[in-house]
Image (spheres, grey):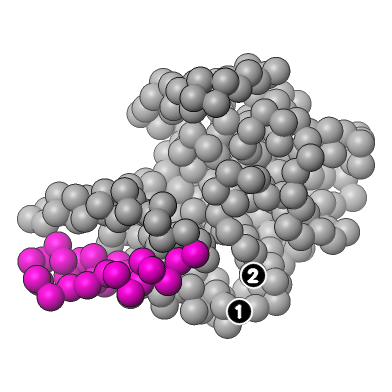
Amino acid sequence: MMNIQYHSAEVIIFESTLYQTTSTLLISASTLLLVDPNWSPREVQFIHSYIREHFPGRRLYLFLTHADFDHILGVGAFPEARIIASEGLQHYPEKDRAIGDIRDFDARFYWSRSYPLYFPEVDIVVEDHRQVVQLDALELHCFFAPGHTREGLMGWAASHETLILGDYLSDLEFPFVYDHSQRYLHTLDEVEWMIQNYPIRIAVPGHGQAMIDDLGEMKRRLAKDRLYLSRLQRFGRGETSVVFDDLIQSYAFARGLGEEHERNLEKIKSEIGE
């Protein structure tokens, strides 16, 4: 069994027990779009069985927001699906490491998966920023979203007024900067542009609670993420008075975020002098 965070006739948001990771299903008359199926073998199987039971015969697509192992580990359970992802994911330079991360994680929990593990082969490659992918009646606008990772994507489903955020705007996590802090800020600017230019009824982060009819919450999360990144960049420039405790402690699971914050501090040091 898997938690369903949100359910309507057009959108279902599955939520894993691990890191409150989301996997969103967008539903149209002939087409299904599934985002980042995850985490445990049972949860992935639950999503697969749910789709087979409730939506037999519909064409299935997978939308992969980025190449972090928790976002690609369910791909092998859906061999019938066509995969939509960025050109950066198609040419991801560390494919073997990503699969190794999955195997290491599964070994830690003694998990066996009933489907093969492999790095996704992309069928529909997003090569241009704001590229539109037409999936029958489902129109998906794709946006490059570097910062967290270089190959990141976001997607806005026009017919569903739903924004897929990947690992951005979480209520549980400050920005995890694996790529570059300035590119992260540019991606947040793009999110703000989308808020101003598109009707958005549902916005789904990769981890945590979706925002349903709540653009105010989206703006609050944007401001909070920008504040963290601003302090991070000031720290990188050598400002000794920068503090993070108030921001970090405002997250529900702050005790588990220390390692990621330390990684961000090391990452920002490496950006200096570029």
Amino acid type at image mark 2: Met
On the image, numbered disc 2 is attached to which residue? Answer: 211
> Who's the residue at 57% across and 30% down the image?
73
| Residue 91: quadrant of the picture | top left
Label 2 vs label 1: CA separation?
A: 8 Å
> Who's the residue at 74% across and 49% down the image?
3
Q: Is residue 242 above or below residue 59?
A: below
Q: Is residue 44 above or below residue 183?
A: above
Q: Which residues are magenta?
A: 228-252
Viewer-proximal residue, 117 or 80? 117
Crowd band around label 1 with a 10 angstrom C-alpha radius: few (<14), some (14–19), many (20+): some
In the rendered image, residue 71, in percent from the top left (x then y), is placed at 55, 39
Residue closest to the far bottom: 216
Viewer-proximal residue, 199 or 217? 217
Q: Is residue 139 shown to the viewer in this render?
A: no
> Who's the residue at 66% across and 55% down the image?
140
Amino acid type at image mark 1: Leu
On the image, numbered disc 1 is attached to which residue? Answer: 215
